[in-house]
Image (tube, coloured by chain):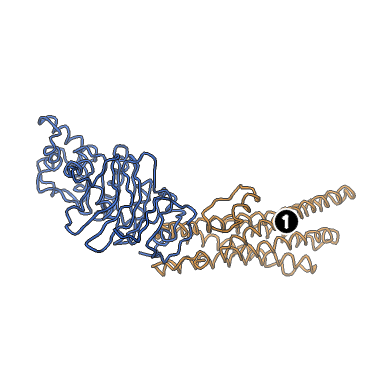
Chain colours: A blue, B orange
Amino acid sequence: MNKEIESSVSVDKSEQSVSAEFVADSYTTVGEPLLDDPKISIRNGNVFYAEKQAIFDVNLDIGKQQVISMIGPSGCGKSTFIRCLNRMNDTIDICRVEGEFRMDGEDIHDSKLDVVELRARVGMVFQKPNPFPKSIYENVAYGARIHGLTDNRVQLDELVEQSLIRCGLWNEVKDRLDEPGTGLSGGQQQRLCIARAIAVDPQVILMDEPCSALDPIATATIEELINELSESFTICIVTHSMQQAARVSTRTAYFHLGKLIEVNDTAKVFTNPEHQLTEEYITGRIG
Amino acid sequence: MNEELNIGPHISRQFDAELDEIRSRVLKMGSLVETQLIKTLDALREDDGSGIKGVSKLDRKVNKLEVQIDEECTQILAMRQPAAGDLRMIIATSKSVRDLERAGDEAERVANMVKQALTNEMQRKLYKGLLGLGELVAQLLKSTLDAYARMDIPGALQNMRLDQDIDEEYSRLVIRQVELMKKNPDNVADSLDVLWAARSMERIGDHCINICENIIYLVSGDDVRHAKFKDIEEQYAGGGY
């Protein structure tokens, strides 16, 4: 860990006019990054790719049944950050994660933790829809099968149906469940991937630019789905669309060069951000 | 404005140009309203109504600019989806042009009354009593446009102080006219006209204060409408917005 980086759990609201040339090693996240009784809690989170540090000393709480969006310029570390929450970064040899990442108080990076089980609890939806090369039915049933969530075919049918209903896809696919998932439209495929994720009864869903490959109508459908799912799940969404962040999330986190600059209610971030870097990014002055 | 907010240009230079265009149109609109008022006051001061003729024409230009600026604000909302300071700039500007347009209407009303009064010796004398109030209002309008151009919260606060002087002057003028009406009941109708004109001038001051509140919102994000001036002054006493 970089010794020069200070721990900065404290939140200083008075720091409202920080220079745009923000290069200091030690920094304080402005806004309200910490919560009471969070679902996920990160303290002094640092991520390295070999010697290069990608995330610097992040302190953030994510609330239960909350939609939080991560925004920031390309390469700011927002995707790297959410990949820490279900240990997707474990798949990258040179990636090293330090600090505390806890879900319901449990250390996500505990070496004894069953990663497969963690990824069932923390599902993920990617930029490009990635249905398995299997039938629509099997795409949704797959996770439930390997986790042994159902005892018989009737229960599995019920789970598949319910998952597809929750994703608003049931009426569109109920008569062709045996057809390949890859034959659906892009928006339908993405909803299928979300159905697959929620079929294993996760607590958290991570979404990494889930609409960037979709047209505006499919995007609106996914956004409506996010809104509905937020009643049951905690959702972290990485997006390059600031309008999307404004539409779907209640809280927004702004990352810049691997640092968590500001966390605030989404309405505040988009009308009156506290940090000048946030202002510059969301008004299209830095990209 | 960008320099005042210590923020650099947008990546889209076209967006910067569009915002600059709107700001310069608002200032142009404001200067037309200012001219309406100054022409009226000059006419009153010099007992010469010839300059007043152009006031209604100026008001039509003010109305046109209001529509044009509103249309440009709508286009920016639709095409650019502005956020944060840009969004506040569009919202504050759209509200401010409405106030400027109404200020222009009030100025036109006063101009027409003054034009009529200059044809009558008695009325002319009574209307002279409006000069002090009118000059304060013209000063407030000018400094409001300055504060808008510079996005200047201290300037906006200074204007709010000036508006209190205007309110006091307006109250004094009302008392004077009431006394005159009591002394000389034959002139009640003329004095009432003067009061209506004074009321219009005082309303121009109120529109300026609405614009100053919009400037504070634009710069700081704080909505100070309906707050007491003392509280607003305390809030910004140490700067830090």
Q: Is residue B186 above or below residue A257?
A: above
Residue B75 showing in the rendered view: no
**Which chain is indicated by disc 1?**
B
Residue that extends furthest to the right in the rendered view of this protein: B183
Residue that extends furthest to the front in the rendered view of this protein: A3
Seen in the image, is A122 located left or right of residue B33?
A: left
Quadrant housing residue B141? bottom right
Report x, y in % for residue A265.
Answer: 41, 48
Report x, y in % for residue B220.
Answer: 53, 56
Quadrant housing residue B38? bottom right
Report x, y in % for residue A72.
Answer: 34, 58
Q: Quadrant of the C terminus of chain B?
A: bottom right
Q: Nearer the viewer, residue B5 or B181?
A: B5
Q: Is residue B221 above or below residue B19?
A: above
Residue highlighted by disc 1: B166
Q: Nearer the viewer, residue A238 or A248?
A: A238
At x 41%, y 67%, the residue is A21
Q: Is residue B229 above or below residue B32?
A: above
Residue A80 showing in the rendered view: yes
Seen in the image, is B108 located left or right of residue A171?
A: right
At x 40%, y 49%, the residue is A266
Seen in the image, is A34 located left or right of residue B42?
A: left
